[in-house]
Image (tube, rainbow, N blue to C red):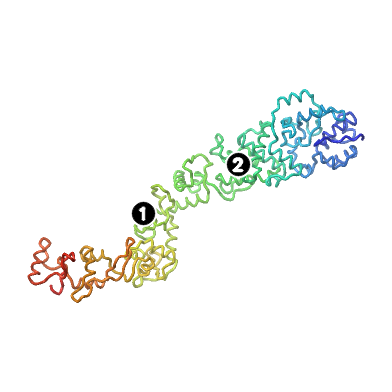
C-alpha cells in the first residue's frame, strides 16, 4: 500500500499499525486488521506469523517490523531484540503513555494525522518515566482489555486533558533501574550481576528488594503506586548494581529494621514480602540468582535447624545459633547459655533475649557450650590429673591450661574451669615420648619433685616436655597421669640454666638443718679446719629469683655434722643458762673452734668433747 508511512522514532509496531490504518484506509485499527485477516490477538501476542503478513502490506522487510515489537518465543517467554523475558515484564494490556509525547505528536499532525504514537519502551514494566520530558508515564492501574483485542484509544486523547495532566506532573528523572533496562535493550553492557540473568528477573529482584527497603518488609505491595514502584526501582538498583555484596547490604537494612511483632519470628517475619515472593511461588517461573543470595543471607543470620526447608532446599547445617536454639539443642538453661556467650565475647552486652536476630556463629557457640559441658572446675583439676593444687594453679596461670572462658572479670564456677579434653591432651603430650618403666630409674624424679629439688617452676619443666627438649624421660603407668612422667633433675637443671655443677643443699636448707642463721652457713663456707681444709664445700649453683646461688656439698655437710657440735647440741646444755656449760668447757680448756662473734654461732670439735 502506498504511499509508504515510516515509523516514528522508537515507535512500537502496534502504534505504527494504528497510524497506518488511519492514514491508508481512514479506519480503526481493529477494522483494518479484520480487513487483512490478521487476528488482533496475534498482533497483541507478537506471533511469528504476524511479521511476514504485515511486511507484505507495509512494503518493508519483516525483520524491520520485528525490531519494533516484542515477539513470542515460547508459551510464556517473549523476546525483544537480543533479550528474552517472561510475559509479566510486558504491560501490553495496560495503556501507558507520556502526556508530553502524545501532545507533541498530536500538535505536530504528521501526515495529516492528529494521533499520538506509542513508544516501544513504554511496554516494559520498569519504564515509568519519559526519558525525553522527565515526567512520569501515565499507566492504567488495571488491564483495559482481556487480551483478545487491542486498546489504542489512549493514543487519541483530548489535548486539553493531556495539558491538565502535565500541569499536575512532577519533574523527575528515570530511575537507575529504568536506565539500565533501556540501555540493555539497546545492547549495552551493565553491572555484571544484572547482566548474568534474564533482564526481567534482574529487574523484578531489584524492585522487590527496593520496595522492602524503602516501604518495609511487610508493606502491602498491592497498594503501591507506579510512583512507589519507580522509587523501589531507584532504591533497589543502588544495591543490585553492586552485585551480591550490594544485595547483602540491602538485606542487612531490612534485617536491622525491626518490624512490629517480628522479633521472635523467623525468616518470613523479618523479610516479609521478600521472603514470601521467593518461597511461595504460584508458578514455575524462576526467581533467578537473587533467591540463592537471599537464602545464604538467611542462613548466615538466623538460627535454622538442619532439615528445615528454606526457599525450596533443606538446610544442611546450622550456621547461626540464638540462645534459645542452643538451650534447646543442649538442654541447658538459657540464662547459663547467655552468661557463657557474654563472658566469651560472642554475644553483645545489649543482647535482647526475645530477639531472634541476636545470633552467634554456630561452630564457635557449639564448641564453647560443649566445652562448658566437659568443664572440670579448677579445684577438681588435682584429682582429675593427679597433681597438687599448686601445680594446677600454676598450669592455668602460665597458660598451659586455659579456662573454658577467658573472661577479664572475676569469673568463677564452671566458666573458669578447664575442658577435660585439654587436661587429657596435656597428659598425652607430656607422655608423647620417653621410655616405659615399671619403677623410677636412679636419680629420676617426677615433674613436681624435680621442680621442688631445683627450686624451679613446675611449668618450666612441663614446657620442656611439651617442646620435646629433654632426652632422659621415663614413663610410669598412665594411670598415674601427671605423676607418671619422670625426668632427670640434672638434665632439667642444665636445660633450664637453673643449676651448675652437682646437685646440693641450698644455703637456706643447710641453715635449717644446722639450726643456724644463713650468715653462719656463709661463714662456714669460708672457714677452714685445723688441717687447713674448707669446713663446708660448694658443689654448684642454682638460680633463685634470677640470681645464681651456691649449693652446699651434701658430703661436706655430713662430715661437718660428724666433727663439729653446736653449743646447744652438747650434753648439759641448759637453755636458761648456756653460760654454765660454756664455763665448764672453758675450765676443761675446751674453746670454740671459731670466734663466736665472727662465726655467729658456737661450734666445738667433737673430738674435744
Where disc 1 sits, the SS reads helix
**Which sits in the foreground, 16 or 8?**
8
Q: Is residue 586 left or right of residue 381?
A: left
Question: Badge 1 is on which residue?
Answer: 379
Q: Residue at x 62, y 35 (%)?
A: 214
Residue 557 in the figure: left or right of residue 245: left
Q: Which mark is residue 251?
A: 2
Vertical order, 202 against 578 (above or below): above
Residue 80 placement (x, y as % from top left): 78, 42
Point out residue 219 in the picture as x, y percentages from the top left corner.
62, 33
Mark 1 or mark 2: which comes first in sequence? 2
- Picture quadrant of residue 180: top right
Q: Quadrant of residue 257?
A: top right
Quarter of the image containing the C terminus?
Answer: bottom left
**As drawn, which residue projects farthest toward the bottom?**
531
Q: CA distance from mark 1 to mark 2?
A: 49 Å
* Residue sitting nearer the eye, 300 or 310: 300
| The disc label shown at residue 434, or none | none
Q: Are the two marked residues, 1 and 2, in contact with CB atoms closer than 8 angstroms? A: no
Amino acid at each position: 500500500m502506498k504511499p509508504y508511512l515510516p515509523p516514528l522514532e522508537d515507535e512500537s509496531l502496534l502504534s505504527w499499525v494504528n497510524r497506518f490504518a488511519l492514514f491508508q484506509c481512514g479506519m480503526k485499527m481493529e477494522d483494518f486488521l479484520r480487513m487483512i485477516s490478521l487476528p488482533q490477538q496475534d498482533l497483541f501476542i507478537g506471533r511469528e506469523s504476524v511479521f511476514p503478513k504485515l511486511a507484505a502490506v507495509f512494503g518493508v522487510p519483516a525483520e524491520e517490523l520485528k525490531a519494533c515489537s516484542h515477539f513470542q518465543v515460547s508459551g510464556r517467554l517473549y523476546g525483544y531484540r537480543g533479550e528474552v523475558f517472561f510475559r509479566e515484564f510486558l504491560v501490553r494490556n495496560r495503556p501507558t503513555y507520556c502526556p508530553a509525547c502524545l501532545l507533541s505528536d498530536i500538535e505536530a499532525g504528521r501526515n495529516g494525522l492528529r494521533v499520538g504514537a506509542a513508544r516501544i519502551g513504554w511496554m516494559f514494566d520498569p519504564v515509568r518515566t519519559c526519558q525525553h520530558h522527565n515526567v512520569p508515564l501515565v499507566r492504567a492501574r488495571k488491564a483495559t482489555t482481556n487480551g483478545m483485542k487491542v486498546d489504542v484509544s489512549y493514543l487519541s486523547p483530548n489535548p486539553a486533558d493531556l495539558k491538565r495532566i502535565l500541569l499536575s506532573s512532577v519533574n523527575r528523572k528515570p530511575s537507575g533501574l529504568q536506565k539500565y533496562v533501556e540501555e540493555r535493550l539497546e545492547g549495552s553492557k551493565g553491572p555484571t550481576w544484572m547482566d548474568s540473568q534474564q533482564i526481567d528477573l534482574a529487574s523484578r529482584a531489584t524492585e522487590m528488594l527496593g520496595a522492602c527497603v524503602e516501604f518495609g518488609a511487610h508493606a502491602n505491595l498491592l497498594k503501591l503506586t507506579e510512583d512507589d514502584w519507580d522509587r523501589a526501582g531507584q532504591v533497589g538498583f543502588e544495591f543490585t548494581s553492586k552485585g551480591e555484596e550490594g544485595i547483602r547490604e540491602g538485606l542487612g537494612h531490612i534485617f536491622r529494621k525491626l518490624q512490629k511483632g517480628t522479633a521472635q519470628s523467623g525468616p518470613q517475619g523479618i523479610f516479609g514480602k521478600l521472603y514470601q515472593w521467593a518461597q511461595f511461588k504460584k508458578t514455575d517461573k524462576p526467581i533467578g540468582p537473587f533467591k540463592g543470595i537471599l537464602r545464604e543471607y538467611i542462613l548466615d543470620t538466623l538460627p535454622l535447624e538442619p532439615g528445615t526447608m528454606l526457599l525450596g532446599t533443606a538446610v544442611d547445617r546450622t550456621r547461626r545459633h540464638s540462645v534459645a536454639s542452643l538451650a534447646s539443642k543442649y538442654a541447658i538453661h538459657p540464662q547459663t547459655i547467655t552468661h557463657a556467650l557474654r563472658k566469651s565475647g560472642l554475644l553483645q552486652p545489649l543482647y535482647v533475649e526475645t530477639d531472634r536476630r541476636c545470633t552467634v556463629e554456630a561452630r564457635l557457640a557449639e564448641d564453647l557450650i560443649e566445652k562448658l559441658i566437659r568443664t572440670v572446675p579448677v579445684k577438681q583439676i588435682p584429682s582429675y590429673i593427679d597433681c597438687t593444687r599448686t601445680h594446677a594453679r600454676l598450669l592455668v596461670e602460665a597458660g598451659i591450661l586455659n579456662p573454658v572462658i577467658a573472661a577479664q572479670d572475676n569469673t568463677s564456677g564452671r566458666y573458669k574451669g578447664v575442658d577435660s579434653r585439654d587436661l587429657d591432651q596435656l597428659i598425652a603430650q607430656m607422655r608423647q615420648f620417653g621410655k616405659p618403666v615399671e619403677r623410677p630409674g636412679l636419680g629420676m624424679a617426677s615433674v613436681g619433685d624435680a621442680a621442688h629439688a631445683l627450686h624451679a617452676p613446675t611449668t618450666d619443666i612441663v614446657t620442656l616436655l611439651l617442646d620435646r627438649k629433654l632426652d632422659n624421660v621415663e614413663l610410669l603407668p598412665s594411670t598415674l597421669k601427671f605423676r607418671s612422667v619422670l625426668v632427670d633433675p640434672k638434665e632439667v637443671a642444665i636445660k633450664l640454666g637453673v643449676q651448675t655443677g652437682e646437685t646440693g643443699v641450698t644455703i637456706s636448707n643447710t641453715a635449717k638443718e644446722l639450726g643456724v642463721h644463713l650468715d653462719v652457713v656463709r661463714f662456714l663456707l669460708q672457714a677452714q679446719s685445723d688441717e687447713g681444709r674448707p669446713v663446708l664445700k660448694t658443689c654448684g649453683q642454682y638460680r633463685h629469683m634470677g640470681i645464681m646461688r651456691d649449693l652446699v656439698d651434701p658430703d661436706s655437710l655430713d662430715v661437718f655434722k660428724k666433727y663439729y657440735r653446736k653449743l646447744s647440741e652438747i650434753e648439759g646444755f641448759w637453755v636458761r643458762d648456756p653460760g654454765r656449760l660454756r664455763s665448764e668447757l672453758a675450765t676443761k680448756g675446751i674453746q670454740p673452734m671459731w670466734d663466736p662473734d665472727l662465726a655467729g654461732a658456737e661450734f666445738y670439735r667433737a673430738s674435744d668433747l
